[in-house]
Amino acid sequence: MKNNSADDDKRNESPVNGSFTAITEGVTATVWTPDYVTRLRQNIHRCSCPGCDSASPLLQFRWKNHVRHSADISCRRAAAEILCLTASCTIAFSEDAAEHLPALPAESLWMNQRCLRLFAVFQDNPVLLLYVLGRFIREAGRLVPSQREALLETWLQPDARQRLIDDFIRQPQGTGYPSAALSSLHKLPLSALAAGDARLPKWEEIRRMNEAELRQSWTKLQKASGLRREEQRKILGNYLFYELCHTIFPGSSPAEWENNFARLCQRLLSLNLLLLVLPPDYGKESVSALLAASLYAARVKTFAGSPEEKKAFLSPVF
């Protein structure tokens, strides 16, 4: 796998709906370019935030059979392009010559495609989408690959989709987030930024709450947010799209899927809490700047920690 910035051509842009370009085994590699990468390429304004330090935030992950373009969201400009999109999320598909590199396992790409199909269906409610993703990888992990497609197709039928929504509503969690994420606020990226941060006085109160107190306060926090509920959901949905693309979620083997899902929950919860604690006069640009700053601060903090902490923070999935 190589990681660098590059351009490609012969693109075919499509919404995230399961329509993917076929590959010619051993000859070509599929190239996926999410829309936020295209916008970053078109925006030549240089950023000098700590997250990128004036370097390009564009990234490229290469395997023999697949190329995935992405960006470093700890860069303020990249975070703005990723989070502030108001249109539908799209991916441009193209082909490139295959290189002498390890191949991306077919099962990993297949599962990533299916998670993106679930994103296309449930993206209007990101926390519901998180619940559906969690159930899908747990159930798919117990099945052989040939059975996973049938599971997904069943879930995409209207009746099954409604049952998933009903099951989500019946969850006694209040916030929609798993207990493990809510009980570990000190591990969230936001906690690396906000100690004493004058911009986020409400966070100091929240970080001292236990899980039960946070659940009880959740609705009140949502109503007090400076952003409308629709704006919050779109930002959270855009972030989930980024994570699914950037990390090739859920990973290379069922043994890793649960851990990768737990980290996804933590990161989405960190952004969700940031949306809830922002002062009323803060807009989407402030959200993206603070998220980028929190992820950069978490990275700096991690590099001061143990080798295991560094690996867990820096390794997306592979």
Image: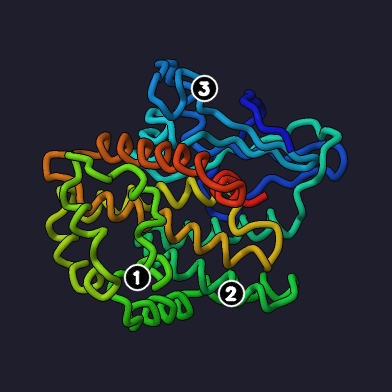
**Residue type of the residue flagged with mark 1:** Gly
Q: Residue at x 61, y 46 (%)?
A: 307
Q: CA distance from mark 3 to mark 2?
A: 37 Å
Q: Please name the residue that numbered disc 1 is placed on.
A: 176
**208 horizontally vs 31: left or right:** left
Q: Residue at x 33, y 83 (%)?
A: 170
Q: Are marks 3 and 2 in contact (CB under 8 Å)?
A: no
The residue under label 2 is 138
Quarter of the image where the N terminus is located: top right
Q: Which residue bears the numbered disc 3? A: 56
256 with respect to 244 (left or right) = right
The residue at the point 76 percent across, 38 percent down is 29
Question: Residue 252's x, y, as percent?
Answer: 70, 57
Between 308 and 228, which is closer to the camera in this rendering? 308
Can you tell which mark lies on residue 68?
none
Against 220, residue 307 (above or below) is above
- Which residue does the image show at 82% across and 38% down from the upper left? 101
Secondary structure at badge 3 equals: loop
